[in-house]
C-alpha cells in the first residue's frame, strides 16, 4: 500500500476516533478497541516512511498517546479533543 493510501486510511480512522470510546454508530462493526488497533497498525506503517515532516510526526506520536491515555482513563472529552486536533492537522499531507 502506498504512503498516500495509508495516510488516507489513517485520517479516516482518526475521524472514527472522534466517536470513541462509546459513540460509534454501529459498535458491532467499529468500536474503540478495533479503532485503536487500526490506528496503531497504520501509524506503525506510516511513521518509518516519513522523511520530511519529522517534527509533525513527533507531534502525532504525542497526540496519539494523549488520546489513548485519555480514553483509557475514561476522559472522553479530552480524548475526543485530541482526536479532533489530529484530524484537524490534516495528516493526509505528511511526507
Image (cartoon, grey):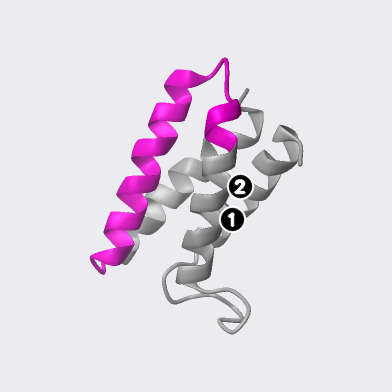
Q: Secondary structure at mark 1?
A: helix
In the drawing, does residue 14 fall left or right of residue 65? right
- Dot 1 and dot 2 residues touching (CB under 8 Å): yes
Give coordinates of residue 34: x percent, y percent. Answer: 52, 69
Of residues 26 and 37, the one nearer the viewer is 37
* Mark-to-mark CA distance, 1 and 2: 5 Å
Q: Is residue 90 visible?
A: no
Of residues 78 and 33, the one nearer the viewer is 33
Count of labels in the image: 2
Q: Quadrant of residue 62?
A: top left
Q: Residues within 10 Å of mark 2 (few under 14, many from 20)?
A: many
Where does the magenta region start and end? 46-75
Of residues 14 and 40, the one nearer the viewer is 40
In the drawing, does residue 4 fall left or right of residue 13? right
Give coordinates of residue 90: x percent, y percent. Answer: 59, 35
Instruction: Report the disc number at residue 53.
Output: none
Q: Is residue 4 visible?
A: yes
The residue shown at (45%, 67%) is 20
The residue shown at (49%, 67%) is 19
The dominant secondary structure in magenta is helix
User: In the rendered image, which residue does mark 1 sit on?
Assistant: 13
Residue 35 vertical placement versus 1 (above, below): below
Give coordinates of residue 43: x percent, y percent. Answer: 53, 43
Q: Quadrant of residue 58?
A: top left
The residue shown at (36%, 52%) is 67
The residue shown at (33%, 65%) is 76
18 within the magenta span: no
User: In the rendered image, which residue does mark 2 sit on?
Assistant: 10
Q: Secondary structure at mark 2?
A: helix
Amino acid at each position: 500500500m502506498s504512503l498516500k493510501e495509508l495516510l488516507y486510511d489513517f485520517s479516516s480512522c482518526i475521524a472514527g476516533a472522534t466517536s470513541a470510546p462509546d459513540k460509534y454508530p454501529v459498535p458491532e462493526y467499529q468500536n474503540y478497541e478495533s479503532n485503536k488497533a487500526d490506528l496503531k497498525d497504520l501509524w506503525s506503517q506510516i511513521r518509518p516512511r516519513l522523511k520530511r515532516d519529522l517534527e509533525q510526526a513527533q507531534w502525532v506520536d504525542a497526540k496519539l498517546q494523549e488520546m489513548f491515555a485519555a480514553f483509557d482513563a475514561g476522559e472522553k472529552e479530552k480524548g475526543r479533543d485530541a482526536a479532533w486536533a489530529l484530524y484537524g492537522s490534516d495528516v493526509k499531507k505528511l511526507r
